[in-house]
Structures are given as structure tokens and as C-alpha cells.
Image: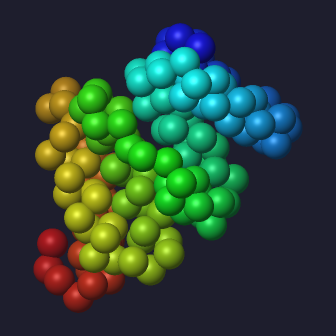
Amino acid sequence: PHPVVCDVVVVVQPRMGNPGSIRNRLLAMYRSACLHHDVPGQAVLQNAILANYLHYNMYGQAEMFINVTTPIERDNNQYARYLYYTGKINAVQLHYSDAEENLSQALRKCPKAAVGFRQTTTKLLCIVQLLMGDIP
């Protein structure tokens, strides 16, 4: 699967009715990308799968997915998104120091033009730092 196709699936997925069928399709596409050594496709699909899990509040499943996959660090934009999702999962799972590290890294890796992403990440990072007892 081409990364652009994966991005379209990610945009359309929350509007479609059955999350299970979409998730199964994303996982099948991820397996295919791994078998074909499609690194950009793997990076996009990892984020799509994590976004799907988080959209439906399946944090345990998302954590298990992170534990069995390796992050793709080749594309900074996708890696920053991966770090954000990992930080959000760690924050919900009460692993605040890991969440702070992931979110700080996501802010460093993301492009300067991604203002909305930077704002969202900074908000979550401030919440995590407050929960840790630090002053943001």
C-alpha cells in the first residue's frame, strides 16, 4: 500500500461505522508492508493503527502493539507522530516519566510549521509535567 492511500484511510476511518473491520484492514495492510519491506508504508500504518486504537480508547491494545513493533525513525514527521501517540499511551497508563520523554522528543522532531501538532503535544506535555509535580 502506498503511504498516500494509508493517509486517506486514516482520514476516512473515524467516519466509517465499523471500527473492527477498519482496524483489521489496517493490520492486514501493515503486515503486507512489512513483508514487502515498505518502510514508509509501515511508518504511516503504525501511526494509523495507533490512532485507531486511541480513537476507540483501546490503550491496552495500543500498548501491546507498541511492544511488538519497532518504531520507524527514517521519516521525522511520522516518527514525531509515533512519539506523540506513545507519550499519550504512557500518560494514560500512568508512566509519566516515559510520557514526558516521548512528548519532549516529539516536540523536537516535529517540523516548525506543524503548529497544531506542536500545540497539542505541548498541552499534553504540560499536563504530564503537572501530574509529575514539576512546573512546566
The answer to whether residue 7 is above or below residue 98 is above
Residue drawn at (58%, 25%), measured in percent from left and top?
35
Residue at 49%, 48% (x, y): give it.
Answer: 69
Q: In which quarter of the image is the N terminus?
A: top right
- Horizontal side, residue 81 vs residue 101: left or right: right
- In the rendered image, the vertical position of residue 3 relative to residue 23, given as above or below: above
| Quadrant hosting residue 34 | top right
Nearer the observer, 71 or 5? 71
Regarding residue 15, the answer to whether it shows in the image is: no
**Residue 120 placed where, x, y %?**
34, 49
Near-viewer residue (75 or 122): 75
- Tell me if residue 70 comes above or below residue 78 in the rendering: below
Q: Quadrant of residue 8?
A: top right
| Residue 74 point in image, percent of width and height | 27, 29
Q: Does the rendering let one see residue 6?
A: yes
Q: Where is residue 82 in the image (x, y as percent from the top left)?
A: 39, 44
| Quadrant occupied by the C terminus | bottom left
